[in-house]
Image (cartoon, rainbow, N blue to C red):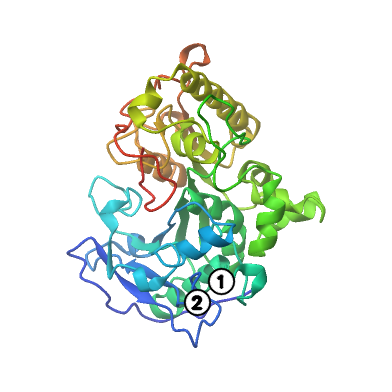
Amino acid sequence: MMLFAICCFLLPHFSSSTPNGALELLDATEYPNSKCLDGTPYGLYFRPAPTIASAIDKSRWIIVLNGGGLCTHKSDCTSRSKTDLGSSNAFAPVYNMDDNAFTSTDTRSPFSQVNKVFMPYCSGDMHAGQRIAADNSTFGLYFSGYHNIVGALQHLSEKYALNTSGNTLVWGGGSAGGVGVFSTVDHVAALLPSLRVVGAPVGGFPPEIEWSTIKGSAPPSEDVRTPAFAVNNQLFNAVLPMACVSALGSKLAYQCGVPHIAYPYLQTPSFIMEAKTDVVITCGFEGQPCKPPWKALLNPDNWHRWIEYGQNMTATMADTVMKSERDGLFAPSCLMHTGFTLDGPIIDGMNVVDALYAWMYPSSDSRNLNNSNKHADVCKDGKYYPPCGKKCPPITKPVTTTKKVLGQW
């Protein structure tokens, strides 16, 4: 177990009058294993709790792992290494925390005044890689996602007192970042034993993935079906949930990289946020014919698949998180991926951020009747398309499995 140094004070960083966090690159000498695909040093964006924040909010942290798919082939990974998904040379100098509902400074959010960290994704390994050498087996690139996490947590502890007894950390992420939460949350809790750590994955908990056979489908460029994790994990030397690895044994341990398989073994309380009809999974990772969007929405074969996916997702949740008294769930029936906002979707009168907060702090919200931890849309007759959710985000943008956590179709 690794313990981080505790700093005695919080250094001034960036004006709390703006929602921006400034880029901080990790020192390559101090953190030699924290790297992007191309070997450039890893970095993060930090916005401290404002000086006027309460002592409680100053003890609270939200860290969000960015999404952006994955890469497992030389051409894909090499191309990615020349972008902000593979090189810190392409990182923007600031990140607007208001671009993400979970780090938003909007006063409607109960987390508006806490410490906020946005962690870019430049390792292509769903934040789980442990490769410290670039050689032929890694296409001459670095898959160091987990080392980036370790370096970031140590940096934040030494410079900004993250690892202070009594602090609370929401360990979140969207899409590939959501998958990364499942792989790393128990490790993060072990690295920061003085903190209350909770997992908050968004869009990283799909049911069993199947490649589409609908007319016009095309095999996705990256395989994230369960058997593929054996090869992918080996490429990344991926960190996996410890209790899952112990339970499944060495031959099946690769399956612990699959969130719905790993979930029952997680030791850290988690609040799972997952759309019941995920457009990026079905279009991007199952290969449904989804371009152009207007044509996809008129295709009855797509309607049937989205209904089937919603039913599969509902069944997966029933077999996992719905059985847990410890964990929480926010599962809207919306054709989306990670586009949760403070305006919607709405379930039980709450948005996703309010629901997360109410789970962490029971009785904090009068709308959370009976302190329920589970908020899930149930569509009549199991027909999840058209979606039956309230205030679903509009479907207006092209399909993408990369870029921002708040990406939407």
| Res. 283 mark | none
Callout 2 amino acid: Gly
Distance of label 2 from label 1 (alpha carbons): 7 Å
Mark 1 residue crowding within 10 angstroms, few (<14) / some (14–19) / many (20+): many
303 shown above or below 360:
above
Could you tell whether 22 is left or right of 347 in the image?
Answer: left
Residue 111, position as x, y percentages in the image:
33, 52
Name the image quarter holding residue 85: bottom left
Callout 1 amino acid: Leu
Residue for badge 1: 141
Q: Nearer the viewer, residue 278 or 163?
A: 278
Could you tell whether 361 is left or right of 106 in the image?
Answer: right
Q: Are marks 2 and 1 in contact (CB under 8 Å)?
A: yes
62 shown above or below 283:
below
| Direction left: furthest residue | 17
Q: Nearer the viewer, residue 306 or 333?
A: 306
Q: Quarter of the image for the C terminus: give it.
A: top left
Under circle 2, the secondary element is: loop
Under circle 1, the secondary element is: loop
Residue at 39% x, 33% y is 291
Residue for badge 2: 39
Q: How many marks?
A: 2
Residue 294, position as x, y percentages in the image:
33, 26
